[in-house]
Amino acid sequence: MKEKVQSFGRFLSGMVMPNIGAFIAWGLITALFIATGWVPNERLSTMVSPMLSYVLPILIAYTGGKMVAGQRGAVMGAIACVGVVCGAPDYPMLMGAMLIGPLGGWVIKKFDQAVEGKIPAGFEMLVNNFSIGILGMILAIIGFYLIGPVMAAVLVFLQGGVDILVNAGLLPLVSIFVEPAKVLFLNNAINHGIFTPLGAQQAEQMGKSIFYMIETNPGAGAGVLLAYWMFAKDKITRDSAPGALIVHVLGGIHEIYFPYVLMNPLLLAACIGGSVAAMFFNTIFNVGLVSPASPGSILAMLAVAPRGGQIMVIISFLIAAAVSFLIASPIVKMSNSSASLEDAQSQMSDMKAASKGQGGAYAATADGGEVDLRTLDTIVFACDAGMGSSAMGAAVLQKKLEAKGLGNIKVKHYSVSEVPAGIKFVVCHQDLVERARKSAPSARIVTISNFMNAPQYDQIVQEILDSRSNKNVANAGGHDFHGGVLLKKNIVLNNAPVDKETAIRTIGKLLVDSGYVTEKYVEGMIAKEDVFNTAIGNNLAIPHGIESVIGEIKNSGLAIMTYPEGIDWGDGEIVKLVIAVASAGDDHVETLGKIATTCESEEAVENILHMSVDEIYELFKA
């Protein structure tokens, strides 16, 4: 259940966060040009309402549709959102956009699936364009008469509930729920999925909103980090706290203090206490921001504070930090000295692993391909929005690469849904791995659980260094080595059935004995099967080494063994022809392609099973 809530929350925030720049633009225009702004300007202030009523909702709906169905979904979401906006003109339809945008994407996705392969040749563009036009119009009408009015009623209800909390002085108690949810990595979902839409409506009416102060204030986390800096018994944890404090307060990356809280869950009391105290202050003195502060740094908060409100924002931050520090200090002092940040990061990793394959640091490419680290020139660091977390992680990894003389490899940060085509290496937080695989199916993916101190950074650097320092690499053409890529002695026919691992080790030994690879490469062939079954159908398997042992190849080579009675290769695959491959880079891809073409059907493989050694040699020697 928790994983579903996290996934839903990330989806909500994923619609808003890529468009935070637009929210900030709207907030700055509001802060500057409305009648009570810094430089009142009646004409320029006319931009405020259209941006909030139309631009922001349509951007959110566009993004939501794109997350579901790409560009066609984005267009559908934008069209349908106009109906929602016009159906409730008195309210900012940000929440309505969060509903109609993904719905538009889902509708066009289902339509495309239904007509796939059924459109007559030459009519594809006609169907594609008119399907969006007609279905978008229908959804816009539904949005106008149904979704818009319903969402307006929901907003009235929520605003009424908030007014009750505010009038009763109970709004600060919301922090009792917000702070634990943040540590479960629901911070962006809460802030941008709930408080941002509510805040936009309040800011339109009052010129600022207290909702923008609830989750964003970095004071509570700052107090915890200060307590660790002053009183932690573990030296590593104590020494890491100052750097984390700077990143948290000035960089606005709240995720960095979550492991410190997980080290001792009692520290949630400090976070809650600091946040509640600040919110009481905010409520009493009517402190708010004119737009969301993203990332949640004190600098961003000051930038979007209303005219004359900067001092009050600073006081709010200091109150949260002071109360949190006072509560956290005795807890940190009395904590078990055996607790470590590494243990907490491991715990955080367990908490966030929401799907199969998220537990390990390294993942195979989604399409079963390989990445040659010797030629790698770009690494993408991906997060939900491609801004705060990924930018910080990218900077840390880039610094480590440059320190080892690998500055020619550039680390770039992107939204996980916007990874550029052709990227071969992606680093992301482990709960985003499935989305990363969809965005970059041909990329190798490394998952982390801590942006600042992930041990995987050093592993990446070392593996690249190892791959580039190993001199035993395949030559460009794979020729002039024992007569070429295939020796007749490495074609062994009519073998008795054995288990899969024995078959791989036997054929791998042929490559080793002929001088093509080292014994470590054979271990890499076994490891490959753990992440990707090399049986590709047609009773054929092509075992080859995992990418980390490519440097163990001395020269490109093949070995071939036949098992007429078949071997159980796992996953329901029966294999009769086994072709071991040792090659790297483009040569590797080309070799696999040629084998797949030669064995394109079960009949082709069956014919090979009846060939002689000489015939098979002539078939595969090139």
Image (cartoon, rainbow, N blue to C red):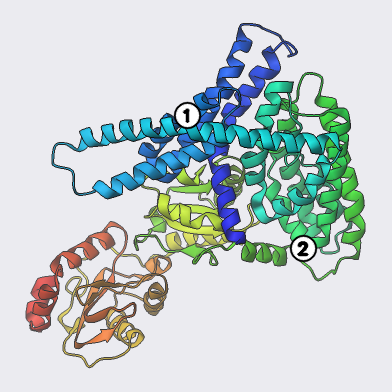
Q: Which residue: 43% across, 35% down? A: 77
Q: Quadrant of residue 395?
A: top right
**Mark 1 vs mark 2, CA separation in Å:** 50 Å
Q: Quadrant of residue 328?
A: bottom right
Looking at the figure, which quarter contains the N terminus?
bottom right
Q: Position of residue 335 (x, y in %)?
A: 86, 66
Which residue lies most toward the bottom here?
A: 496
Q: Which residue: 81% across, 42% down? A: 219
Q: Position of residue 422 (x, y in %)?
A: 36, 47
Residue 18 visible in the snapshot: no
Question: Mark 1 highlights which residue?
Answer: 144
Of residues 373 and 250, the one nearer the viewer is: 250
Q: Amino acid at mark 1?
A: Phe
Looking at the figure, which quarter contains the C terminus?
bottom left
Left or right of 622? Residue 36 is: right
Q: Is residue 15 above or below residue 564?
A: above
Q: Which residue: 43% across, 62% down? A: 467
Q: Earlier in the sequence, mark 1 or mark 2?
A: 1
Q: Secondary structure at mark 2?
A: helix
Q: Position of residue 463 (x, y in %)?
A: 49, 62
Q: Which residue: 53% across, 53% down? A: 428
Of residues 480 and 499, the one nearer the viewer is: 499
- Badge nearest the viewer, 1 or 2: 1
Q: Amino acid at mark 2?
A: Met
Left or right of 213? Residue 538 is: left
Of residues 249 and 211, the one nearer the viewer is: 211
Q: Which mark is residue 263?
A: 2
